[in-house]
Image (cartoon, helix red, strand yellow):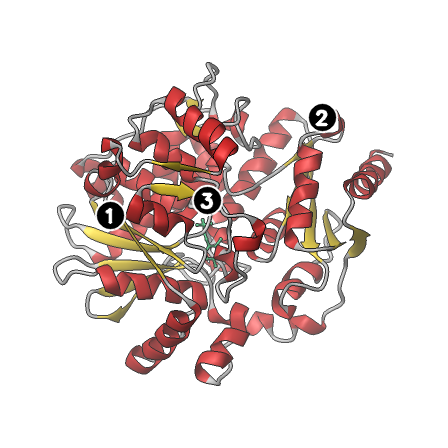
Amino acid sequence: MYYISTRGHPERRKLCEILLEGLAPDGGLYVPETYPLVDDAMLDRWRGLSYPDLAFEILSLYIDDIPPADLKAICASTYTPEVFRTDRIVPVRALETGLHVAELSNGPTLAFKDMAMQLLGNLLEYELARQGEELNILGATSGDTGSAAEHAMRGKTGIRVFMMSPHGRMSAFQQAQMFSLQDENIHNLAIEGVFDDCQDIVKAVSGDADFKRRHRIGTVNSINWARLVAQVVYYFSAFFQVTEENSSKVDFAVPSGNFGNVCAGHVARMMGLPISRLIVATNENDVLDEFFRTGLYRVRGRADTHETSSPSMDISKASNFERFVFDMIGRDAGRTSSLFDGQLREQGFFNLSSDPAFANAADRFGFRSGKSTHADRLETIRDTWQRSSTLIDPHTADGVKVARKHSVPETPMLVLETALPVKFAGTIREALDREPDRPRQFDGIEDLPKRFKVLPADAQTVTSYIAEIVQRAAG
Ligand SMILES: *Cc1c(COP(=O)(O)O)cnc(C)c1O
């Protein structure tokens, strides 16, 4: 399997070569040259598999530059009941008739990003050992991504993490999840600024090719293809859990920000998993809902990006969206380039409302969308609690709200649960005036000793700090 750029760069690359890459050299995103297709016989065989075995079957279609026995071992050591606190890894529970929740948030940081990041940590450690290399991961986080990355990379040989977060702006729980890690290879940088300042520093460093090469800097952000392909697995797993035969169809509703999670659903559907509709649920930051309703893709400025009570979906643009648009317009790389590198960069939007390809988004690719607001979120958390005595987190609530709008009686609806409520206790209190349950191993984490370094919002200071640590380690 080779990977190509959505913008037509002539190079074809293998998975291990893009494991650490963000963008392709031309600024596009990597996509598989073709989607491997599954047939009924494969689905029959996969239906009874454990999660790690299913992961191995699906990943082997995309990764052929790791020997199968090694890939199998990596899957087996990633998706364990010890890490995911449940034998099924992604259990599906019924919320009400026809509406199910697929639990993606039983990993170490209680959010769905663990599903992919845990695999990526093990793939990276394996590949770096094979090449005799090391890697310094630089990232910016406002919460979930950073802690998922740190928990996936902690203690890994050959990997260091430098994770920037806005000083004093994360919830106490999220901060504790990161800052309480005592591992030598994890470096928390509390930046005196907001999340955008942290992201600007990542951008500045990423633009400094010389510094990046000398200090072996890489990123593990949401456009990483290996993360995306890891997410394809749970669409299959969830499908098997709510159907009895492979001819059944299901719908998925996915709380969305950067279009990473639901893009994996699109890939699963392209492979032939019988998904009828993929329902994109956004919060007040409705870039994607606007596109799927109207065909207008309009990136928001900072001033128009809202801080909401489903904060992990607070985005100004959807970083993975180009992958879908590439497919939607018939894999025309020149056109993708002129939309994303031309129109979007020049005028901040592109409009496909009168383009025949836009009708494909719904008709051929099954996309629907909807938006959920703070009031909807509270109402959905309350209502779900009253109807089914289950507590759902604010992001999942956005998914449930939009799922109900689109659900049809004959097709099972699967909502992806992207976080546990304990991560967002403030909103749960606001909705229900009660405390969310806390898994036992998280008792009192806010009181643990913290390890972090406060730095000004200045790229130069951050790069000097990184350089010093890397050089000291090199002796
Ligand atoms: C990251 C995240 C999302 C959004 O996922 P995308 O892949 O960016 O669309 C939704 N919910 C939670 C809890 C998250 O951490």
- Tell me if residue 366 comes above or below residue 225 in the rendering: below
Residue under label 2, please give it.
213
Circle 3 packing at 10 Å, graded few (<14), some (14-19), many (20+), is many
Q: Secondary structure at mark 2?
A: helix
Q: Secondary structure at mark 3?
A: loop
Q: Quadrant of residue 229?
A: top left
- Observer-nearest of 374 and 135: 374
Q: CA distance from mark 1 to mark 3?
A: 33 Å
Q: Label 3 CB, ligand 1: below 8 Å?
A: yes
Q: Which residue is mark 1?
A: 47
Earlier-in-chain disc, 2 versus 1: 1
Asked if the residue under mark 3 is in contact with the one under mark 2, i.e. CB atoms within 8 Å, the reply is: no
Q: Residue furthest bottom?
A: 433
Q: How many marks?
A: 3
Q: Would you say 269 lies left or right of 128 here?
A: left
Observer-nearest of 146 and 183: 146
Q: Amino acid at mark 3?
A: Ala
Going from N to C along the chain, the mark reached first, 1 or 3, is 1
Left or right of residue 412, residue 19 in this image: right
Question: Does label 2 or label 3 sit earlier along the sequence?
Answer: 2
Q: Which marked residue is nearer to the observer: mark 2 or mark 3?
A: 3
Identify the residue at horizontal 43%, vertical 45% (top origin).
260
Q: Quadrant of the C terminus?
A: top right
Residue placed at 33% from the left, 38% from the top? 267
Q: Is residue 277 above or below residue 311?
A: above
The residue beneath circle 3 is 318
Residue 470 in sight from this viewpoint: yes
Give the percent coordinates (x, y) of residue 244: 16, 54
Q: Residues within 10 Å of mark 1 (few under 14, many from 20)?
A: some
The verdict on label 1 being within 8 Å of ligand 1 is: no
